[in-house]
Amino acid sequence: MQTTVVLSIAKKEIMDNIRNKWIILVAAMFAILTLVVSYFGSLGTSGWQDLGLTISGMTQLGSFLISIVAFMLGYATIIGEIERGSMSSLLSLSANRFEIVVGKWLGLGAVLCFTILVGYGFAGMLIALNVSNVDILEYLVFIGLTMIFGLVFLTVALFFSTVFSKRSTALGGAIFLWFLFNIILPIVFVGLLATTIDFTQVTMETTFTFPDWYFALNLFNPISVYSSLITIAIGPVQSSTGSGFIPNPSWYTTCLLLGVLLAWIIVFYILSVWRFQRKDI
């Protein structure tokens, strides 16, 4: 693999996003939303909240937004080049298909991580100036885990960009995937759980224990994994999958959940390379 070729492709992806103001707009959106959540995050009150409460409020909202941003960055990165005819020109030079995938993933990953760092980082500094006893390390851990979470969806989007034959179809696939992870899977998992519960036996005095298979199923949804990981590494958060209200099982550990997110990245990255190697251009 030629390092200079990979870096050139990555640089092109970064510069393309800088020219269309993508980085600035997304970073500003992250910063504004973080500040709004911090100042108006408590029900019935207003005023700056500490970073811990801000993290709790941003975990669910951020998971929705970051998955959208990652999908929009990656859904057309391969098929878009093919439709424009620039992929053939790129392959006619010294770059091979493996180097193209590596370069595009690095470039788009840098764009995504930079926007998260700048947006959340700028907001974090403003919050730190207005509240006391700020745990900067905790907030940096939150930003780092959020970057990894974003790379999961970017890699999934990259894979689906190699699957579809049209840009419009790839966009439809990205929209479906967003609904799948954010809405469909949580509803399906909760529905399956509901079929196993005899609600006539559940009272205010009883303590319901959620089965391990429910938590195992949630490992197949990176949004649920991310929420649970933040809960374990930093503190309880509210989540659309229920992680903020349902205690995580004892076998949920930071290493396990982080490993699951990394596995998503590795598996779909390998699939992206494999599929692109076999794609007709």
Image (cartoon, grey):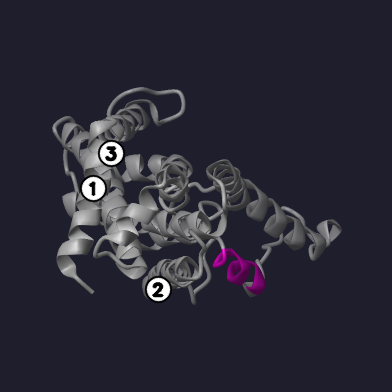
| Mark 2 burial class by Cα count in 10 Å: few <14, some 14-19, many 20+ | few
> Which residue is pictured at 59% across the width and 72% down the height?
216
Residue 211 figure quarter: bottom right
Identify the residue position indicated by label 2 in the image.
259
Measured as percent of width and height from the top left, residue 180 is found at: 62, 51
Q: Of the residues tagged 2 and 1, which is closer to the observer? A: 1
The stretch drawn in magenta includes residue 199:
no
Identify the residue position indicated by label 3 in the image.
17
Question: Which range is magenta?
Answer: 213-220
Residue sitting at the far right: 200
Measured as percent of width and height from the top left, residue 27 is found at: 28, 35
The stretch drawn in magenta includes residue 218:
yes
Distance from disc 3 to disc 2, alpha carbons, whole Å, reads 30 Å
> Which residue is pictured at 57% across the width and 66% down the height?
220
Q: Earlier in the sequence, mark 3 or mark 1?
A: 1
Distance from disc 3 to disc 1, alpha carbons, whole Å, reads 9 Å
Please, is residue 250 above or below residue 242 in the view? below
Residue 261 figure quarter: bottom left
Q: Earlier in the sequence, mark 2 or mark 1?
A: 1
Please, is residue 252 above or below residue 228 in the view? below
Tell me the kind of residue under disc 1.
Answer: Lys
Where disc 2 sits, the SS reads helix
Distance from disc 2 to disc 1, alpha carbons, whole Å, reads 31 Å
- Numbered marks: total: 3
> Which residue is pictured at 19% across the width and 71% down the height?
2
From the viewer's perspective, is 159 left or right of 148? right
Q: Which mark is residue 109?
A: none
Tell me the kind of residue under disc 2.
Answer: Gly
From the viewer's perspective, is 240 left or right of 254? right
Q: Of the residues tagged 3 and 1, which is closer to the observer? A: 1
Residue 90 shows in this picture: yes
Identify the residue position indicated by label 1 in the image.
12
